[in-house]
Image (tube, rainbow, N blue to C red):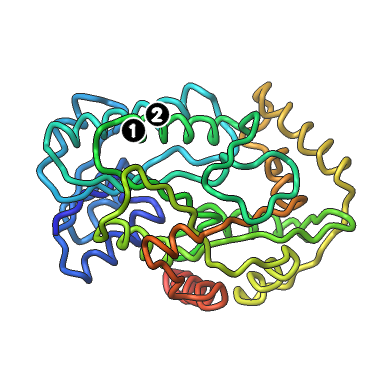
Amino acid sequence: MKAIITGATGGLGRNLGEFLNKKNWEVIGFGRNKKIGNSLGYKFKAFDLSDPDETLKAFEKADVVFHCAALSSPWGKYEDFFKHNVIATKNVITAIKKYEIKKLIHVSTPSIYFNFSDQRDIKETYLPKKFVNHYAKTKYLAEQEVLNSDIDSVIIRPRGIFGEYDSVLIPRLEKIAAKGFLPVIKEKNPLVDVTYVGNVVYSMYLAAIKKTPEKSVFNITNDESMHIYELFEMVMKTLNKQVKFKKISYNKMMTIAKTMEFFSKIKITKEPLITQYGVGLIAFDQTLCIQNAKNILNYEPKYSIKEGLERYARSKYQTL
């Protein structure tokens, strides 16, 4: 099997490439980080997917494309998100058609579900009245490009990816904790889902090798919902760090987030340490139904959250 991975220098893409290499697949990686790309151990091309000519020139014949590339952040300009999430996806689809590649595995996000309320067992068909931020909106628009195309495709929505090469979830927690405490909402201990990257990679592999219904969409989690206090404590304990919780009212936290966002918008600071979306994530339940993935892909997580954190910690300390 021959695979093309976009976003090959990101956390998910790097783990996927290593997994497929071990399966003796032929892998080609696309990304913008030349330093990481040249160390991947397989063919790599550095360019910007939002450039249609560069994208067409870089692509070649393959069996499957794993589209992991995205601008993933709770903060930024809409035009940047649109460029890297929607335009880039359009260009990938055009290239897939030109080279007659059989299948696309498109990585999306359950951020499209978020609506500042408690949500449990969310199914793939749910949509809020309004998207929470530019990232969620443009990832939904990218999904529509995939669903409206005539190529064989699978969309996955993995929740809270963590693990080796993570530069987002756990590092952000560590950054906040380094201030002396982790803020939590008074009288709230929401139930949340996260997913170890090895399980996400496994779900993508299954999506690639199995015959799936046309335009399939799958939620992916560790199938191990946890209360946020328990999750935070497990993360910090695994990293051998002490954690203190500071209970703050929801309204106060939102006021702090709005203030930080305001200063970022007027360019006094860069990305705010806390956003309204970030406050929402620690204030409300959000768990996903993964029954479709179980039934159709025969997906079952291979690693528990505890095992995933231990693997992440080992990889982190090995690189220090």
| Disc ID at residue 89 | 1
Question: Does 95 sit left or right of 35 as displayed?
Answer: left
Q: Secondary structure at mark 2?
A: helix
> Where is residue 64 shown, x and y percent of the image?
21, 50
Question: Does 32 sit left or right of 275 as displayed?
Answer: left
Could you tell me the amino acid type at mark 1?
Answer: Thr
Q: Estimate how packed mark 1 is, as few (under 14), some (14 to 19) or many (20 or more) residues with alpha carbons within 10 Å.
A: many
Residue at 84%, 36% in the rendered image: 255
Q: Which residue, given by chain and number where applicable, does mark 2 sit on?
A: 86
Question: Does 105 sit left or right of 270 as displayed?
Answer: left
> Where is residue 62 shown, x and y percent of the image?
13, 48
Residue at 16%, 38% in the rendered image: 59
| Disc ID at residue 133 | none
Could you tell me the amino acid type at mark 2?
Answer: Val
The N terminus lies in quadrant:
bottom left
Observer-nearest of 137 and 206: 206
Q: Secondary structure at mark 1?
A: helix
Q: Are marks 2 and 1 in contact (CB under 8 Å)?
A: yes
> Where is residue 165 shown, x and y percent of the image?
43, 60
Residue at 47%, 49% in the rendered image: 157
